[in-house]
Amino acid sequence: MFVSHPLIKKNKLEIRDYQTEITKNCLEKNTLVVLPTGLGKTPIALLVTAERLNKLDGKILFLSPTKPLIEQHKKTFENMSELADLKVFTGVVKPEKREKEYKRARVVFATPQTIENDIKNRIIDLKDFILLIVDEAHHSIGNYAYTSIAQKYIKESKNPLILGLTASPGGKAKKIGEIKSNLFIEQVESRVEKDKEVKKYVKEKEVERIETELPEDYKTAKKLLERIFNKKVEYLFKIGALPTKRVSKKMLLDFQNFYSKKAKQSKRKELFFAVSKVAELIKLDYCLELLEMQGAKQLREYLKKLEKEKTKASQKLFFDSEFKIFNKKVSGLGGHPKLEKLMKIVSKELDKKVIIFTQYRVSVDEIVKKLKEVEGAKVGILIGQKSGLSQKEQVRIIRDFEEGFYNCLICTSIGEEGLDIKGVGTAVFYEPVPSEIRSIQRRGRVARLIKGKIYILITKGTRDEAYYWTAYHKEKKMKNFLVRETLNSW
C-alpha cells in the first residue's frame, strides 16, 4: 500500500501506520520526532509538508546542518512529491540572488547558518512560512543557529508550525528539555526499534566487539606518560588549583576556561600560571588518548606539532626530563594493533560496502595507507571542510561510494550524521565514542536497506572501554526518558 495524496507521487511512498499516526499528531502541535535511523523521519517531514501546503497558502523551510544532507533531503522530496520550486540555499550563492530565489521558492532547503545570516541581513522574510522543519534537532542547544531561527520564526510567521527530527536527542533530561524549549516543542513522538509497530521495518544489525591488547612497549610508554600526568595533577592539587586528584578531560577544559576568564579580568600572575599548567595536562591527556586509541604515528605527528608551538605549556613539557624520555620511547614504537584487526575485517567484508569511522583526522591517512594493502579495497575519504574537502566534493564522494567507485569509505564525524548512504552492509568503529548521540548516528549508517554488521575496535585496559560503556549507559537512559516523554504527550 502506498500513500494517496494530491502532492505525493503515486506508488512512491509506502504507507506505514506509525508514520501516519506521527504525521497526524505533528500537524496539531510543534513536535519533536525521535526515530531510529532508517525508519523514515524524512517521509514524515514530507507528509507534514504536503498536508500543510495542501490546506494552507505558504512556504516551507527545511533546515539541515550540512550541504550533503540538504541535497539529500531535496532529492527525496523531488523523487516522492509533486511539489515544484524546491530550492537549495547555502552561503555559496550570492546574497542578492538568494533574496530573489527566496520569493520564488515553495520549499526552501538550507543550512541554518545561511538562514541565520539572511535573517540578520533582512534577505529572508519568515512571515509566509507555514512550517519549519529542523533536521538533526539535537543541535538546538546553546548558540547554535537553530535556536535563533526558531525564535524569529515563531515571532514572525503568520501560521507557525515546527517539526524537529532526530535519531538521538541525548541522554540527559536537561538537554532534551533545552531542545524542547529552544524549538517551542509541545509534544514528543518517539519510537524505538523494539516497538511492535516499527519492528518489522528494522533491518537486523549484528554488533561485534573486537578486542586488542596494547603491545608491551606501548604499555611501558603509557605508564611513563601516566606518571608525568599524575605528578602534575598532584602539584596542582597541592597548591589548590584543582579540587581533586581524579580529573577528567571535561574537568580540565572547564578549569582552563574558568582560570582564563579570571586571569583576563584580574591580570593576576598566579591565575595565568594555573591556565598554563592546566593546558599542560590537557596536552598530556590528548597524548595518552592518541597512544591508547590511535597509534604511535598519530602521536608522533602531534608531538612534532607541540614542539613547534610557542606557548609556555608546550615549551615546559619539552623541558621536562621525563617527557623527553617518553618522547624518545614513542619514536621507536610500531603501529597500533587495531590496524591489523581492521585489515582482516575489511578483507572479510568486501563483498559489501564498508564504512569506517574514526574520530581523528590524523588517523585517516594511516588507515588509508594500511587498507591499500588489502586486495580489492577501493578506498574513499569523507572528511569535513576544515580538513580540506568542500561540500561539493563531499556530495561527489558519497555518490561515488553509492555507485561502487569506492567499496570502502573512511569517515570522520562528517559521515556520522543523517546521511542516507545506500547499500552499506558493514560499519567499523575504529574507536568507541563516549557520546550516545554519535554512537547512535554511526550505527545508523548501516543496515538501512540490507542486513548489516557493526564492528567496534576496543583496546583492553584503555579509555576505549570507558568510552564504550559511557555511550551504552547514556543511550539506555535516553531511551527510558523518551518513553516517559512520549507517554506524557498522549
Image: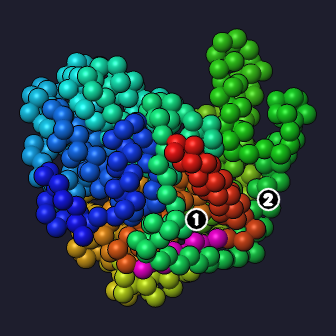
Q: In which quarter of the image is residue 224?
A: bottom right
Whether residue 64 appears in magenta in the rendering, the answer is no
Q: Quadrant of residue 95?
A: top left
Q: Is residue 411 above or below residue 177?
A: below
Q: What color scheme is it?
A: rainbow
Residue 255 in the image, given as x and y percentages of width and height: 71, 31
Q: In which quarter of the image is residue 308?
A: top right
Q: Is residue 159 above or below residue 411?
A: above
Query: Over which residues does the magenta segment extend?
Result: 451-458
Q: Which of marks 1 and 2 is nearer the N terminus?
A: 2
For badge 2, the amino acid type reads Leu
Q: In this rendering, does residue 174 appear at all? A: yes
> Which residue appears at 49% of the width and 57% of the height?
191
| Residue under numbered circle 1 | 431
Residue 313 in the image, given as x and y percentages of width and height: 67, 36
Q: In this rendering, does residue 337 appear at all? A: no
Q: Main structural element of the magenta stretch: helix, strand or loop?
A: strand
Structural distance between the alpha carbons of marks 1 and 2: 23 Å
> Which residue appears at 66% of the width and 37% of the height?
253
> Which residue appears at 22% of the width and 18% of the height?
122
